[in-house]
Amino acid sequence: MHLLYLDDSGSAPNQAERCFVLGGLSIFEAQADWFTRELDKLATTIDSTSPWSIEFHASEIFSRRRAPWNRMSKQEAQGVLKAVLQIIAGSYDTARVFACAVEKSSLQAGVDPVELAFEDLCSRFDMYLSTLRAQGDRQRGLLILDKTTRESSLQRLAADFRRLGTQWGSAIHNIADIPFFVDSRASRLTQCADAIAYAVFRRFNSGDTQYFDLIAGRLYASEDGVIHGLSHKTQASIALHCMCPACLSRRLART
């Protein structure tokens, strides 16, 4: 089974933030243990006596307000965040990054950025699984997210996507069940998803590409070069000139 671990970055109701991001990592189930062990090794370099107590929460690492990050310099803390992303970048060839960045100013009244991003990634993950299925890999997928107050509504949406389809096309056929929700403190893979979402958030919200660039090569892309693993929900007039990989790859494919 293919597992897509997702987490968000940014606050949907915070109008001071330009974007809301949902993003994460798709791996084959047998690969999960490797990621856990690699992050445990990294945690041991931070606290050798209780590495299991270290949670790699990207925004907390970056802000350095809490232990153990408040005992680090800015460069040291940023180095830890980059080390998490480098583990993802240097992992299995089949590992794929997915993310959706929603520009809040582009949303129509009443549209929820969380639900839009979730629907988008369900559709993209299903498309990815369909591609694998056409190549002979008949494994289905499963979504795993950090615990949230939106758990019930997202599970209901996922069930609707399987039954009725998304706004972009046919019903979801390759995702085995409704999403599962876990405590990120106990899941290294959810912490990987958090780092990915934060890297994408920094790219779109602040123009800071140093984290995103580390994992950009892992974005799911088709053979024609279109980057399907990254979606930028913005106004059409902006997308015509946007230089992000999602918008640029689509424009180049049309030329």
Image (cartoon, rainbow, N blue to C red):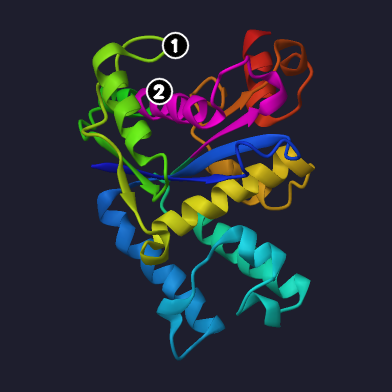
Is label 2 in a helix, a strand or a loop? helix
Quarter of the figure with the C terminus: top right
- Nearer to me, 202 or 33: 202
Q: Is residue 244 left or right of residue 190?
A: right
| Percent x, y of residue 175 | 26, 30
| Percent x, y of residue 47 | 52, 85
Q: Which residue is mark 1?
A: 168
Q: Residue at x 24, y 32 (%)?
A: 137
Instruction: Confirm whether residue 91 shows in the render.
Output: no
Figure quadrant of residue 236: top right
Q: Given contact means CB atoms under 8 Å apart, are the residues at marks 2 and 1 in contact?
A: yes
Q: Which residue is mark 2?
A: 123
- Nearer to me, 8 or 16: 16
Is label 1 in a helix, a strand or a loop? loop
Q: Residues within 10 Å of mark 2 (few under 14, many from 20)?
A: many
Q: As displayed, is residue 32 above or below residue 26?
A: below
Q: Residue at x 67, y 52 (%)?
A: 211
Magenta range: 98-127
Disc nearer the start of the sequence (2/1): 2
Q: As displayed, is residue 1 above or below residue 103?
A: below
| Percent x, y of residue 92 | 41, 52
* Disc 1 residue type (three-letter): Trp
For the stretch drawn in magenta, what is the main secondary structure? helix
- Cα distance between the residues tagged 2 and 1: 8 Å
Q: Is residue 68 left or right of residue 18?
A: left
Tell whether position 122 is magenta: yes
Quarter of the figure with the N terminus: top left
- Nearer to me, 157 or 117: 157
Q: Residue at x 40, y 78 (%)?
A: 52
Instruction: Confirm whether residue 67 shows in the render.
Output: yes
* Disc 2 residue type (three-letter): Ser
Q: Which labelled disc corresponds to residue 36?
A: none
